[in-house]
Amino acid sequence: MGTMTEKKEQIATRVAYGKTLAELGKENPNIVVLDADLSGSTQTKFFAKEFPDRFFNMGVAEQNMIGVAAGLASTGKIPFASSFAMFACGRAWEIVRNAVCHNQFNVKICATHAGLTVGEDGGSHQIIEDIAIMRVIPHMTVIVPADATEAKLATRNISEFFGPVYMRLGRSNVPVIFDENKYEFKIGRAPIVKAGIDVSIFACGVMLSRALWAQEILQNEGISAEVINISTIKPLDKETILMSVRKTGCAVTCEEHNIHGGLGDAIAGVLVEHNPVPMKKIGVMDQFGQSGKADELLIHYGLTKEKIAEAATEVIKLKNAKNC
Amino acid sequence: MPLSDEKLRELKEICKDLRKSIIKMTHAAASGHPGGSLSATEILAVLYFAVMKYDPYNPNMPDRDRVVISKGHATPLVYSILAKAGYYKGDDLHTFRQLGSPYQGHTDRLRAPGIETSTGSLGQGTSFAVGAALGCRLDKFNNRIYLLQSDGELQEGSTWEAIMSASHYHLGNLTCILDRNRIQLDGWTEETMSLEPIHKRYEAFGWHVQEIDGHDLNQIYDAILLTQEIGPKEHKPCVIISHTIKGKGISFMENQVKWHGVAPNDHELEIALKEIENS
């Protein structure tokens, strides 16, 4: 707490990633970057311009890109491989699984344009399954930065961490939540962004801002919600999650992802095993996206502060009914 | 520059030992892939015992020559040759494919030393080799990446993505040896999904191409040496299409589809070992 910024800026996480990567290139000669014909979109173009010898455009061939990244890692390089999340995770999944994770190679898959907020490109590009398919692979670390500050810090952090990482980044501008000078990012740590006692709201990515807005709605209704940023989906910060629900007794999860297999199911797994409490998942209800503006899509698919507040009220009711 | 008579004799003996080991390992495991191991025996023997620079006591030596086994099912051959090259004693090779064994069904770099990358899923080794070649070039090493490719995996689209990228990046430090044994699990490659004309296809993708008899030690050696010259000079990746016989050296296995992934029984083991000994 006390880590939030007063500013009302909006920056896409991919922009923070691209700029940080170019900075890291100066500091660490082992960092190499691969892209699959999308360097303008993924923002690896900044690195490409500064370090053309360490940038490899692999063309529209994501499977090869990931395999080549594994080969580069075997020579001690730290490859960052970027494309749209649909292709880096979806198209190349088996290569990610076998060439990278089964080998435990130090490859960072930093994929942009994840989720509905891709916007106008529509359903073919709006991956809402990536968290699910990445987190089930052994040895994979899965990170979803909530804003530009966290994306910047996480990019730096994973460059110093040894092992395969998937980092999910977005296309659209999202509110800057954290103050760069105060916020600390650590893999596997879920920071409590707002403390509360009545309900735990677990959110990741763009949904953290929505969760914080929902917290304000609830506050006006006299409900004290705790908002926790699950920026590391794997390994999950079980301790913080369980500590929170032991206090609040109920939970809501919020993600720009299918309700199946993502953050909600990861949290549910922890709760069911250790401390079952009433819980609701806010996410895409197992359907494909479509063209539209990012914000319109989030509203259309029910990923809003109002829905989060509603779900919070419902789980509190369930908790109270159980306790009667 | 041909191999000396002494070296030739030594390599022939090594190939005999490797073949015996391949047969014994698959027999002990009662499963595995003898056919494609026997077809690539001479290729790997020349690489490990006449060409490559490596140190079995320091398997991660940064500027080592690297061999990438893209046909990860050729483990009976790979583990046998790594034992012979001194990476381990190999007195436990009979545990191949058993629970807890370092010798996995398909190569696993984290369980046994000397393996650059775990493979087994076809169509991935070529990409890995491209990455390793790019990495070694960044480090300005004067080494080579040798890739053992199967013919069946040319049916994987990702293999051609990798082939395309190798010439795009002018990887003169990459030599691919294609084990052209013409048989895949379901039958002849040309009947299952035709691959020809491989020579022209590789050429069209910007590679230097040679074709050899993949069981002729001198031809293998000369062809590899030529790639060491041509690659850096023409800034081109090189492929050696090695025409081989699946199941080579054992009469009842040669050119038989069945022996892609079937182990010999006790009787077959006995005949096979005799044939190898008398060859």
Image: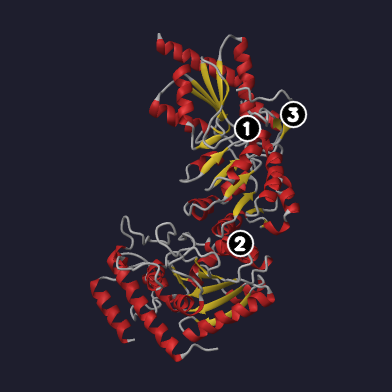
Find out whether the residues at labels 1 and 2 contact each other: C-beta distance under 8 Å: no
Tell me the kind of residue under disc 2: Gly
User: Dot 3 surroundings within 10 Å: few (below 14), some, or many (20 or more)?
Assistant: few
Please name the residue that numbered disc 2 is placed on: B135
Most distant residue in the right direction: A49
Please name the residue that numbered disc 1 is placed on: A146
Image check: B203 left or right of A261? Answer: right
B261 and B278: which is toward the camera: B278
Residue shown at the point (31%, 59%) measured from the top left: B98
Label number found at residue A9 = 3
**Does B193 sit above or below residue A44?**
below
In terms of secondary structure, where does tag 1 sit?
loop
Q: Nearer the viewer, mark 1 or mark 2?
A: 2
Give the percent coordinates (x, y) of residue A150: 64, 34
Quarter location, residue A306: top right
Tell me the kind of residue under disc 3: Glu
Tell me the kind of residue under disc 1: Ala
Label number found at residue B210 = none
A203 and B101: which is toward the camera: B101
Quarter location, residue B82: bottom left
**Does B74 sit above or below residue A189?**
below
Q: Nearer the viewer, mark 2 or mark 3?
A: 2
In terms of secondary structure, where does tag 2 sit?
helix
